[in-house]
Image (cartoon, rainbow, N blue to C red):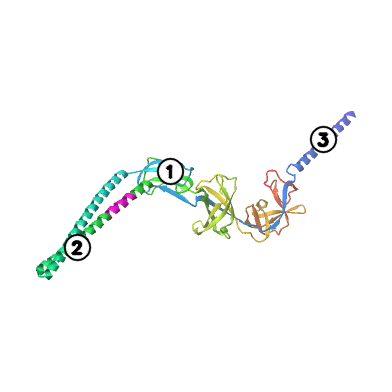
Amino acid sequence: MKSLLSNRAKTAWLSGFLLVLFGLFLFAALRSGPLAPVSVTTLRVERIELAPALSGIGLVEARFGHKIGSVGAGRLKSVRVQPGDAVKAGQLLGEVDPVDFDERLRAQDSAIKRAQANVLVAQAQVREAEARAGFASAQAKRYSELGKSRMVSAESVENKRQEQRMAAASVSAARAGQEAAQQELSGLRADRLGQKQVRDSLQLIAPVDGVVVRREADPGTTVVAGQTVLEVVDPASLWLNVRFDQKRAQGLRAGLAALISLRSQPDTAFAGRVARIESYADAVTEELLAKVSFTPLPAKLPAIGEMAEVNVALSALPLAPAIPNAAVRRVDGLLGVWLLEDGDLRFIPVKLGAVDLQGRVQVLEGLRGGESIILYSRKSLSADSRINVVDEIEGARQ
């Protein structure tokens, strides 16, 4: 009898223990297991005048750049700057040692001396011709008077007049020779001055205050006339050459605000502004081209050619419902949101429109404004999901 009672007590105790264990398991399952409610955050749909965002990809360029090189051929003697160095207008950046330049100067100096001597000879010839012309004129006048008195023959008078004419022609020829010699001398002197300017131009001088962005040659390199050695840009002229999709660029105009994200500084958004819209587009990629300037320039200047993402806020659209992009879900191939009505979930397909810089998207169909929808959820939802509305979910961007 005692043994029977003992077995019953054990059975009852074991049953009670299993019941408690099942209850604890059920409680845990309902709180944190697969049957637990899904934590969600909600929001009220608002009607706003959304300003669409237009995204594009751009490259950093300099509006004003200066390519510096030699106007004559020579060997690069020195380069005193490196890319990234700041320079001042008039600063000597490098020098070019010209090829056979001194020999050419000596040859020009010799030619000038010869031309000066030719001018002196021509001047002496003019003086001699003028003296002969003066004598011939006096003789012709004297013989003319004698001819009137019939003291000399008419033939003698005519001969003296002919000598006068020949002497006058000799003066004209001598003066023409003097002018030609003087022009030759002036031309040689001009060439000599030009060569001096060429020598001066063989010095690489910074034309403006700026930053060296490119160095194309090193000392010892032979350069030709017009070859670029250095490139200097004005940092204040940095802007971006941006490409936008033509289909989405309606409303893009100069003066609109922009946000710029440089690849070298992805965590920083720089303020910008659309400077101008180009009058031509890329027919191959179907992209519109625009210039976007920094307002203001970044403290750490980007490199020329660096890529950047640019988002431009277009003009505001008419009042309409708008929701965060994070609230949009895809269920059975349809885009929509989870609507919360009296604690029940219902998936509502929506038609979406433009997106702004804050990640809000305009709802064209499906919502009217004022509805309560799910923003974030701990895991995927279904119409049968049990939910627990919380203020925030750890790890979700609020």
Residue at figure coordinates x 76%, y 40% from the top left? 28
Q: Nearer the viewer, mark 1 or mark 3?
A: 1
Reading the chain from its start, which is encountered first: label 1 or label 3? 3
Q: Nearer the viewer, residue 383 or 114?
A: 114
The x, y position of residue 98, in whole percent, is 34, 44
Say what secondary structure mark 1 lies in.
Answer: strand
Left or right side of 90 for 23: right
Residue at figure coordinates x 42%, y 47% from the top left? 68
Q: Nearer the viewer, residue 32 or 106?
A: 106
Number of numbered discs visible in the structure rendering:
3
Left or right side of 311 for 381: right
Residue at figure coordinates x 59%, y 56% from the top left? 256
Q: Which residue is mark 3?
A: 17
The residue sitting at the front extreme is: 149
Q: CA distance from mark 3 to mark 2?
A: 148 Å
Q: Is 208 one of the magenta-colored residues?
A: no
The x, y position of residue 220, in whole percent, is 37, 40
Say what secondary structure mark 2 lies in.
Answer: helix
Q: Nearer the viewer, mark 2 or mark 1?
A: 2
Q: Which residue is mark 1?
A: 93
Q: Amino acid at mark 1?
A: Leu
- Circle on res. 386: none
Mark 3 near mark 2, Cβ–Cβ under 8 Å?
no
The x, y position of residue 115, in whole percent, is 25, 51
Reading the chain from its start, which is encountered first: label 3 or label 2? 3
Q: Amino acid at mark 2?
A: Ala
Q: Which residue is mark 2?
A: 168
Relative vertical location of residue 370 with respect to residue 12 in this rendering, above or below:
below
In magenta, the rendered stretch is: 183-193
